[in-house]
Image (cartoon, rainbow, N blue to C red):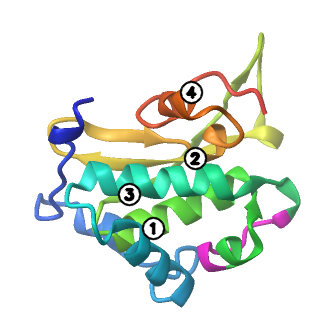
């Protein structure tokens, strides 16, 4: 992906639903609003904003499956979350920044064996014209070196968690 080409346009037909609020996103919460303003105010391009939001979550939220299904504001306040909660939070931050985003999940491969529903994995996708839906997995980026986090911004790799 070329960063300069990672623009977004919510005016494309059908994308407005990927900017909408939901109880899991809580776009009006101070935690979500203030963080998006802080991390994206000086960034002009959608791709640069998306990367800043992704990097923040990958660096500051720790993986913990015991949290449940709390919304983005609760995850930001608590500082940890499951892959579902990472995804709720990243989708909320992207949508608040005006970047169409959606919640996705699938059976994820761990090593040589496919995982089943008890370890079903979730991640976010952001829409960028010219690229389509781009996977962003802040959970998989947590705890890895900065250069390796790039593999999870725009790509899916074998899970090791």
- Read off the residue under disc 4: 148
Residue located at (52% from left, 74% from top): 25
Question: In the rendered image, which residue does mark 2 sit on?
Answer: 138
Residue indicated by mark 1: 93
Mark 1 vs mark 3, CA separation in Å: 9 Å
Q: Is residue 50 left or right of residue 138?
A: left
- Pick whichever of labels 2 and 3 is earlier in the sequence: 3
> Are there few (<14), some (14-19), or many (20+) residues within 10 Å of tag 3?
many
Pair 1/3: label in front: 1
Query: Mark 3 or mark 1, which is nearer the start of the sequence?
Result: 1
Instruction: Say which quarter of the image contains residue 157.
Output: top right
Cα–Cα span, label 1 and label 2: 12 Å
Label ID, residue 85: none
Span colored in magenta = 67-73
Secondary structure of the residue carrying tag 2 is helix
* 58 w.r.t. 110: above or below: below
């Amino acid at each position: 992906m070329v960063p300069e080409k990672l623009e977004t346009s919510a005016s494309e037909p059908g994308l407005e639903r990927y900017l909408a609020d939901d109880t899991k996103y809580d776009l009006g919460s101070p935690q979500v609003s203030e963080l998006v303003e802080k991390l994206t105010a000086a960034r002009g391009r959608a791709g640069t904003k998306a990367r800043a939001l992704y990097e923040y979550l990958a660096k500051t939220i720790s993986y913990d499956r015991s949290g449940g299904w709390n919304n983005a504001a609760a995850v930001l306040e608590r500082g940890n979350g499951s892959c579902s909660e990472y995804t709720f939070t990243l989708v909320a931050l992207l949508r608040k920044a005006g970047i169409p985003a959606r919640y996705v999940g699938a059976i994820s491969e761990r090593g040589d064996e496919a995982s089943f529903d008890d370890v079903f994995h979730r991640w976010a996708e952001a829409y960028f014209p010219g690229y389509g839906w781009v996977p962003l997995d802040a959970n998989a980026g947590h705890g890895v070196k900065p250069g390796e986090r790039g593999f999870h911004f725009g790509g899916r790799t074998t899970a090791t968690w």
